[in-house]
Image: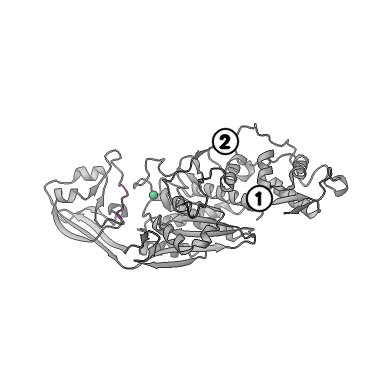
Amino acid sequence: MTDYNPDWNAYCEKANSLLKRLFPICRSITGNGVRQTLSILLEDIDFDLHEVPSGTSCYDWTVPDEWNIRDAYVKDSSGKRVIDFQANNLHVVNYSTPIDALMSFDELSKHLFSLPDLPDAIPYRTSYYNKTWGFCLTHKQYLALDKKEQYTVRIDSTLEPGSLTYGEGIIKGTSGQEFLISTYTCHPSLGNDNLSGVVLWALLFKALSQQKLRHSYRFVILPETIGSIVYLSRNESLAKKLSGGFITSTVAGPGKFGYKRSFLSNHLIDRVVRKTFQELDLEYIEYPFDVNGSDERQYSSPAFRIPIGTITKSKYYEYTNYHTSLDNLDFISAENLVQTLKLYILAIEKLEQNKTYRSRMPYGEPMLGKRGLYPQIGGSINQKAANMSTPHGSRPYEVSVEQIIYGDELDALRWLLFYCDGQTPLLDISEKTNLPMRQLSAIAEKLLEQNLLEIV
Ligand code: ZN
């Protein structure tokens, strides 16, 4: 993988079009909404679809019946839809059992959910394993309901044996090391959590497929919890060999960049992300590992212990719109999404560049002049290598590789020759010297050509 600098505007346009097409679809942990979503993603990238039948055991869990919904509403006696699934699919509790009945407000109200503190928001509610039905509405809508009305309540859904759908694709490298990139497709019309993560996952898949890679990257797209448990149960030995990974979630909000650490806190995965933020001088919030979150809880469970990190923009739990209808396409943007995509690409680039080199001339320093390596290699920027006391984290938003400050070329070359003892990977050297990985990697590859270094 060499420096990847594609047409980012094209990525923005693609992100925008995917967000618009996918947002209205009613997704869940199973059903046609997931299939429709995956088939749209398959127009641009190539992965396999898997259908796991209802009733299949996976560790302590069982794949539930498949849920599909066509329509749902609450009508007053004049026939007016006072709650309408067609207006917003969040109006129905996800996985609601079918119902067709006439009832009083008192009866109906036991099945209504609203948020008094956020009166314009429809909450997102699910009931996957407890068979019931319900409607979600804004608190303003709730207050406007006539308490004396008889309401026609209809949910035209099915909950029957079917299957759970997930996708899996692999981009093959040569090193034998494999990393996981996972996201979840179970959320209906919600923007940052997690349509943004789904679209970033697809664009990252596309970006990595266009490059020659050293490591392999396994991309999985599945419903949260049950999906990752199904996946692990069907791919146990493969999963145990994974070197680490990422879950793409909440990547396009207006808030700060964030990073949720792996359970190991200072694993390679954590270090490449930190290095990315540091090189770009980007402001971000680092969150400790927490079992509350997404599928890292499954992937990092005792039998697997895969270190998983998540780079975010407006992290889940941290914004008031979270899990409500206000987390919509107005809250997120394709531009924000592509900023976070760049961070993922730069972090993965560091995984790729993190080779271990050994000096073939460890006795003193080799004579650089006779090899044309002195005083500089290529177009150097005449700037002293940054040092660890450089203040960083001052830029709140823009992600641009032009922000990366390169050190003095001769300095970088000398540090490389000094540290390349066959035991110090390039990321360690980058952390010790504060020189950017792109610069160190480019020089190391040049020294490799000159036979001054070899790869361990
Ligand atoms: Zn969520």
Taking the image as shown, residue 108 lies to the left or right of residue 41, namely left
**Which residue matches tag 2?**
393
Residue occupying the far left of the picture: 148
User: The residue under label 2 is which amino acid type?
Assistant: Gly
**Which residue matches tag 1?**
354
Label 2's element?
loop
Q: Would the CB of label 2 be found within 8 Å of ligand 1?
A: no
Q: Is residue 263 visible?
A: yes
Indicate whether residue 123 is drawn in magenta.
yes
* Residue 30 pos. (x, y %): 36, 62
Q: Residue at x 31, y 56 (%)?
A: 128
Q: Earlier in the sequence, mark 1 or mark 2?
A: 1
* Residue 44 pos. (x, y %): 51, 63
User: The residue under label 1 is which amino acid type?
Assistant: Asn
Q: Give the mark toward the camera: 1 or 2.
A: 1
Q: Residue at x 54, y 37 (%)?
A: 283
Query: What's the CA distance linking mark 1 and mark 2?
Result: 23 Å
* Residue 204 pos. (x, y %): 54, 55
Q: Which quadrant holds residue 375? A: top right
Q: How is the image coloured?
A: one colour
Give the residues drawn in magenta, as a range: 121-127
Taking the image as shown, residue 254 lies to the left or right of residue 244, namely left
Taking the image as shown, residue 151 lies to the left or right of residue 429, namely left
* Residue 129 pos. (x, y %): 30, 57
Q: In the rendered image, which quarter contains the C terminus? A: bottom right
Q: In the rendered image, which quarter contains the N terminus? A: bottom right
